[in-house]
Amino acid sequence: MQASIRHDWTLTEIQDLFKLPFNDLLFKAQTVHRQHFNPNEVQVSTLLSIKTGACPEDCKYCPQSARYDTDLEKEKLMEVEAVLEKARMAKKNGSTRFCMGAAWRNPKDRDIPYIVKMIEGVRDLNMETCMTLGMLSKEQAITLKNAGLDYYNHNLDTSPEFYGEIITTRTFQDRLDTLENVRSSGMKVCSGGIVGMGEKANDRAGLLKSLANLSEHPDSVPINMLVRVEGTPMADNEDFDHFEFIRTIAVARILMPKSHVRLSAGRTEMSEEMQAMCFFAGANSIFYGEKLLTTENPEANQDMTLFKKLGIEPEKREGYSDEVTEAALLETVTEAQAPSLFYDAAAN
Ligand code: SF4
């Protein structure tokens, strides 16, 4: 029987899923996964930081915040043509979606014409487009949608209860409002969170409850594991239990059966075996490239080697016959030595 799509999960139900014996939980998640997806395909996105650092927000995990003294090199908004050059490389290396991230509280109206040109240019390359630019007004969301933006990323980060411990410069409700503006404009929503920030198990359940009980599930759900960056208030956080991370992926898969669950920041600290477990638990999307936002990410060719070992193919989209196969991708990446310019907006 197909799992129903629900938006009324209670915290107790979600906590009970987390408490299942590990094998039972993974079996359940894999069963749900197979009802909606090819279990041997993983969607591959590339993300570029189009404006890096000097962000006025105070997210405690983030090296891009201007409030923390990190080694991050700040960069102004990139020129449109430079962004499109990176998009062409990403396409050549097999990405089907190009995500562009800017460390802003929100885009200013003066930035919008450049943003629109970037969206139009990437669309012309026959790639899906995604952006993460901070909070978005209703009007801005409509403008970006009309320019051809497919996805907008804006994470809830954590549970409503723990949220105030992590960020004080914008509220949980601000985030929900942005998601509503994005959804009502007709764009697809990408929203997830971060674990390992010192939250309790209840907060992980609360984050997933908030995502699963949105009026529509996010199309993509990135689950990030905190990357502890020197200079941020979370640099000395304790190691996060890997089994608990895999459980979080599995519960996300069960709660949001049709969403792409993305294995996101923190992948560099995961062994191949752990990544394989995450795929088995229902993760079916990754960022591909050498860097994940401002933190390291396993090199793209390592990703493709792992895919090969596991018999996984990059997900292809219907109607896009020009997308490369895994074999061709592996060859391309090995030859080109994976570009060193891609980042993930685990942020925003
Ligand atoms: S997570 Fe986003 S909003 Fe928060 S400090 Fe980093 S770039 Fe700014």
Image (cartoon, grey):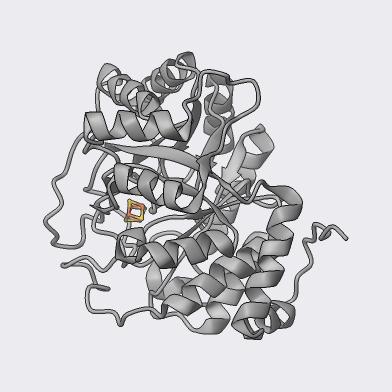
Q: Which quarter of the figure is the N terminus placed in?
A: bottom right
Is the residue 161 above or below the residue 118 in the image? below
Residue 255, visible in the rendered structure: no
Question: Residue 229 lies in what quarter of the image?
Answer: bottom left
Q: Is residue 144 left or right of residue 27?
A: left
Q: Position of residue 264 (x, y in %)?
A: 42, 55
Answer above or below: position of 91 versus 224.
above
Rendered residue at 35%/66% (across/down): 270
Residue placed most toward the observer, 303 or 142: 303
| Residue 153 visible in the snapshot | yes
Please state the quadrant of the image where ligand 1 appears.
Answer: bottom left
- 71 displayed left or right of 201: left
Q: Position of residue 28 (x, y in %)?
A: 71, 70
Percent across and percent down for residue 299 are: 27, 47
The residue under the point 39% across, 37% down is 46
At horizontal 38% and vertical 53% (from top left) the residue drawn is 347
* 235 sits to left or right of 134: left
Horizontal and vertical percent position of residue 173: 57, 60
Which residue occupies the foreground of this view, 337 or 175? 337
